Image (tube, grey):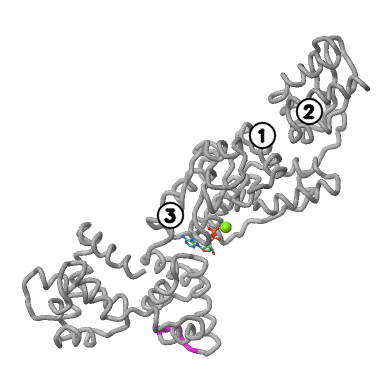
């Protein structure tokens, strides 16, 4: 026993406390067989990891403790089959988070394409896939879409877990001496979705545990998907070995959505709910939320609820009413004056030029752009817009707005300019 203790001390020194606690503590000395030292291990995973990762250290420790070289043989002594389902799964997939329900735009198309590739080719396309971006931008939705796809298409064993649940789960199983079951549960996943990875900050034991889990799954060609607010290199106190593994696959970012995409998301939500929403209300909602899709949904739901309480159809007036107490609607509403000023500045003209009757192209085109923007960004009617521009007839305004819309769809240059202009109002 004394030699066994010496063996353990030597090992502890060479592999470090964390790995020792994790991988060697559960190992028992069985005896010798010829030139080999027999060690009992709780399960297959242990023989795998010990054999692949710690064999040189084990041999060196054995030689030091027993005074001569020994080979190492692992024996699974406790043959208690562990049911992966023994522990309740910490988190579950939300069936609504599918690819179909996910609106694709410039800000998320890369992450979306990567997620699709992973869903269709798990463990072959990118492993791990690391999705990062600000809060409320669709990371959880996207990673769960991969999960839902894999469950439905091929009945894979998918495990979705946040770092916090993983931590709690680990602590509980340690307390209840169920660490083996805990590990078995996670290690039996075909696809693991680990969310809110930024919360690994400073959680050393969790990081150790995750490191081994990551290696085992990765080597067994299981897919790993991670999501985080920050890039791995920007997560404080993240072990270097985890950082390099997280960055060893594909990093895909999600940016905040632009105005058009926000409108598209509101539209889609409304369609999914079976209550299509008028365009002006969609735009109103999109304009009143900065860049967070979760907030966008919140506002949308508030309006739908208000309309239903007050027994009216969803309209712009109803939407404004619904938000009066929450938002200072007037102050966030753009005035035509601001739009005129911005457009004039953009084209190097004076506001007076835009309002004038001068029909030279240098004036008429920016003027038409201005009408188009006012139509999109305010609730002025065509005649009201006409009045702003020296009492133009409403048919002229309609013509201008339609013309700009048409050019915008055909001409990339113009579209870019208009996007830039719209950007200034977000
Ligand atoms: P994150 O995990 O990045 O904080 P979530 O995935 O929880 O964000 O997204 C917040 C909400 O916004 C969810 O209800 C999600 O369905 C919705 N959402 C985000 N992005 C999109 C999108 N591109 N299309 C449709 N819904 C989206
Ligand atoms: Mg999330």
Residue 376, quarter of the rendered image: bottom left
Q: In whole angstroms, how far apart are the C-alphas of marks 2 and 1?
A: 21 Å
SS assignment at label 3: loop
On whether residue 68 falls in the magenta region, the answer is no
- Residue 1 x %, y %: 93, 22
Q: Around disc 2, counting alpha carbons within 10 Å, would you say few (fewer than 14), some (14 to 19), or many (20 or more)?
A: some
SS assignment at label 2: helix
- Residue 25 x %, y %: 83, 33
Q: Which quadrant of the rendered structure holds the C terminus?
A: bottom left
SS assignment at label 1: helix
Q: Residue at x 68, y 54 (%)?
A: 164
- The magenta segment: 312-316
The earlier-in-sequence mark between 3 and 2 is 2
Q: Residue at x 8, y 81 (%)?
A: 357
- Residue 206 x %, y %: 70, 45
The earlier-in-sequence mark between 2 and 1 is 2
Q: Is residue 366 above or below residue 393?
A: above
The earlier-in-sequence mark between 1 and 3 is 3
- Residue 277 x %, y %: 43, 76
Q: Around disc 1, counting alpha carbons within 10 Å, would you say few (fewer than 14), some (14 to 19), or many (20 or more)?
A: some
Would you name the residue on which mark 1 appears?
A: 216
Would you name the residue on which mark 2 appears?
A: 12
Dot 3 beta carbon under 8 Å from ligand 1: yes
| Left or right: where 24 falls relative to 354 | right
Label total for image? 3
**Nearer to us in this view, 130 or 87:** 130
Would you name the residue on which mark 3 appears?
A: 108
- Mark 1 vs 3: CB contact within 8 A: no
| Left or right: where 280 falls relative to 228 | left
């Amino acid at each position: 026993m004394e030699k066994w203790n010496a063996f353990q001390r030597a090992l502890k020194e060479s592999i470090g406390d964390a790995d020792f606690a994790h991988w060697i503590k559960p190992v028992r000395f069985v005896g010798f067989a010829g030139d080999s030292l027999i060690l009992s291990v709780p399960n297959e995973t242990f023989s795998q990891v010990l054999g692949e990762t710690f064999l040189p250290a084990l041999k060196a420790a054995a030689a030091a403790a027993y005074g001569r070289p020994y080979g190492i043989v692992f024996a699974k002594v406790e043959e208690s089959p562990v049911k992966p389902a023994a522990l309740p799964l910490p988190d579950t997939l939300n069936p609504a988070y599918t690819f179909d329900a996910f609106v694709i735009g410039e800000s998320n198309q890369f992450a979306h394409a990567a997620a699709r590739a992973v869903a269709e080719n798990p463990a072959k396309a990118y492993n791990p896939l690391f999705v990062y971006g600000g809060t409320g931008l669709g990371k959880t939705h996207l990673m769960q879409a991969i999960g839902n796809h894999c469950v439905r298409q091929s009945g894979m064993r998918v495990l979705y877990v946040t770092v916090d649940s993983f931590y709690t789960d680990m602590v509980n199983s340690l307390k209840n001496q169920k660490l083996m079951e805990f590990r078995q549960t996670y290690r039996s996943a075909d696809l693991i979705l680990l969310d809110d990875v930024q919360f690994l900050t400073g959680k050393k034991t969790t990081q150790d545990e995750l490191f081994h889990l990551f290696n085992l799954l990765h080597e067994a060609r299981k897919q790993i998907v991670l999501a985080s607010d920050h890039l791995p290199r920007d997560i404080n106190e993240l072990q270097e070995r985890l950082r390099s593994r997280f960055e060893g696959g594909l990093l895909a970012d999600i940016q905040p959505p632009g105005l058009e995409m926000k409108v598209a998301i509101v539209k889609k939500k409304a369609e999914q709910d079976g209550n299509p929403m008028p365009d002006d209300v969609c735009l109103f909602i999109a304009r009143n939320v900065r860049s967070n899709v979760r907030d966008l949904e919140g506002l949308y739901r508030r309006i739908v609820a208000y309309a239903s309480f007050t027994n009216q159809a969803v309209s712009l007036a109803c939407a404004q009413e619904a938000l009066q107490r929450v938002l200072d609607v007037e102050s966030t509403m753009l005035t035509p004056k601001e739009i005129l000023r911005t457009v004039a500045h953009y084209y190097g003209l004076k506001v007076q030029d835009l309002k004038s009757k001068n029909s030279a192209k240098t004036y008429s085109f920016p003027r038409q752009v201005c009408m188009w923007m006012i139509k999109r960004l305010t609730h002025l009617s065509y005649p009201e817009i006409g009045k702003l521009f020296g009492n133009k007839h409403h048919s002229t305004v309609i013509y201008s707005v339609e013309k700009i819309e048409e050019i915008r769809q055909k001409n990339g240059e113009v579209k870019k300019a208009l996007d830039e202009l719209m950007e200034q109002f977000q």
